[in-house]
Image (spheres, rainbow, N blue to C red):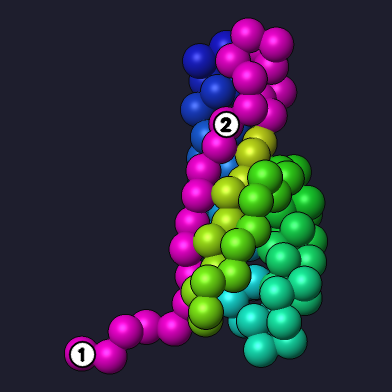
Amino acid sequence: MVGSAVVARHRASAAADLAALAAAAQVPAGPQAACAAAESVARAMAATVASCDVDGLDVIVVARAAPGFGARVAGPATASARAGPAEPG
């Protein structure tokens, strides 16, 4: 059960990272397009987007992934990520 929870945590983290990057690339098209991109990436990684917030040019995504074994005991793993343009300097 612990191994399944660890795998879910890694999956949630990777999904949040990649979903935030995908969303940041779509920010010029608007917040709805950005969050739709995040949801698409998360879904492809067997995760869900718990929240997607566009803050200027940055996007903050919270992703959740359920463990395969012991889901009733452990519950979903959650991770957040932020993506946007690099700060100068």
Residue 44 vs residue 24: left or right? right
What secondary structure is found at the residue carrying circle 2? strand
Specify whether residue 61 is in view.
yes
Residue drawn at point x = 62 percent, y = 46 percent: 63
Relative height, residue 66 to residue 11 (above, below): above
The residue at the far top in this view is 73
- Residue 77's label in the rendered image is 2
Query: What range of the chain is rendered magenta?
Result: 66-89
Residue drawn at point x = 68 percent, y = 29 percent: 66
Residue drawn at point x = 59 percent, y = 15 percent: 74
Relative height, residue 4 to residue 15 (above, below): above
Amino acid type at mark 2 = Ala
What secondary structure is found at the residue carrying circle 1? loop
The residue at the far front in this view is 56
Find out whether residue 70 is within the magenta segment. yes
Residue 60 vs residue 52: left or right? left
Amino acid type at mark 1 = Gly
Residue at image mark 1: 89
Residue 85 vs residue 21: left or right? left
Q: First in sequence: mark 2 or mark 1? A: 2
Which quadrant is the N terminus positioned in? top right
Q: CA distance from mark 2 to mark 1?
A: 35 Å
Relative height, residue 66 to residue 57 (above, below): above
